[in-house]
Amino acid sequence: LAWVISGDPMTGFKIGGAEVVTKMILYYFHERGWYKINYGLDRRNERKKRMIRAESVSKNIIVQDFKIDSVKRKNLLSQNSVLIWFTGLSGSGKSTMSNLLESELFERGFKTYALDGDNVRHGLCNDLAFTEEDRVENIRRVGEVAKLFLDAGTVVLCSFVSPYTKDRETVKELVGKENFIEVFVSCPIEVCEQRDVKGLYQKARNGEIKNFTGISSPFEEPVSPDVILNTNSEEVQDS
């Protein structure tokens, strides 16, 4: 068209080439931006569709009763099952404290199992990101898994950032408040950053990691936890 209007083939080729390059650049930025926006929309839409499918299926599902129940399993193991929930900022020492406590309980003959935030995201929750909605779903799944372990008579130790009070309360209601011990691993964010061998906090401050708790995403401290561990001022063994 530029060739026809100008009557000069070279002018036509130059205008046409410039148009092609401009469209390629605009297309590139459009796709990058749209991917990021649409990714969240797709995830939310898929979540809604999954809930709709689950609702229709649940109408045809009933709870199956078995002869061996939680009481019999606890009697066999000679222990009570309990969920010990460690919450706190990344780098506060949740996994460390959970690991030490489980080792101590194991040495004393208790049947235990530890669920850790990083570990479950390699399998059970590897389809989830760190948006608010995905964080909620992550804790919901972990709560359901913990409930199964409690039913098996096991002492369960969970170490998760779990930044939202509502999610922690949901897990408590799910397993029963009498079976839930909330442990707040308290540590100043400055100290957590100093401990951060993976450099996640620095990446978050540089904008390389989105929705990072304590930097670009909130952490709601427990109002009345059952236990508070001040890992900044206490020795690990003392805690």
Image (tube, rainbow, N blue to C red):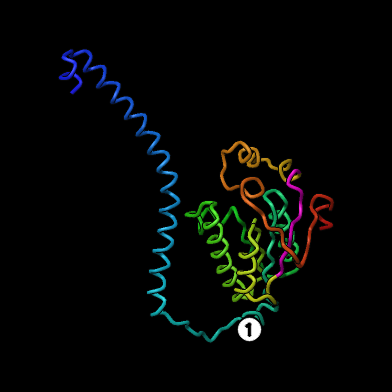
Q: Which residue occupies the extreme front position in the image?
A: 5
Question: What percent of the width, then of the height, locates residue 143?
Answer: 58, 67
Is 144 displayed left or right of 228 in the figure?
Answer: left
Taking 181 as reference, is 10 above or below it? above
Magenta region, residue range: 181-190
Which residue corresponds to the image point at 41% horizontal and 38% vertical from the top-left? 32
Query: Residue 45 location in percent, x, y?
Result: 40, 58
Q: Nearer the viewer, residue 83 or 21?
A: 21
Tell me the quarter of the picture where residue 21 sits: top left
Q: For mark 1, does the 10 Å Cα neighbourhood hold few (<14), some (14 to 19), or many (20 or more) residues?
A: some
Q: Could you say which is closer to the camera, residue 227 or residue 72?
A: 227
Q: Position of residue 146 (x, y in %)?
A: 60, 68
**In the image as oriented, which residue stretches furthest toward the bottom?**
67
Query: Does the segment drawn in magenta span residue 221?
Result: no
Q: Residue at x 67, y 54 (%)?
A: 219
Residue type (three-letter) at the residue carrying disc 1: Val
Q: Secondary structure at mark 1?
A: helix
x and y, in percent, of residue 73 in the image? 62, 80
Looking at the image, is 68 positioned above or below residue 190? below
Residue position marked by numbered label 1 in the rendering: 71
Magenta segment includes 186: yes
- The residue nearer to you, when weighing 4 against 120, is 4
* Horizontal side, residue 67 vs residue 82: left or right: left
Identify the image quadrant of the C terminus: bottom right
Residue that appears at 62% across and 57% down: 116
Quarter the N terminus occupies: top left
The quadrant where residue 176 appears? bottom right
Question: Which residue does the image show at 74% across and 64% down from the upper left?
Answer: 223
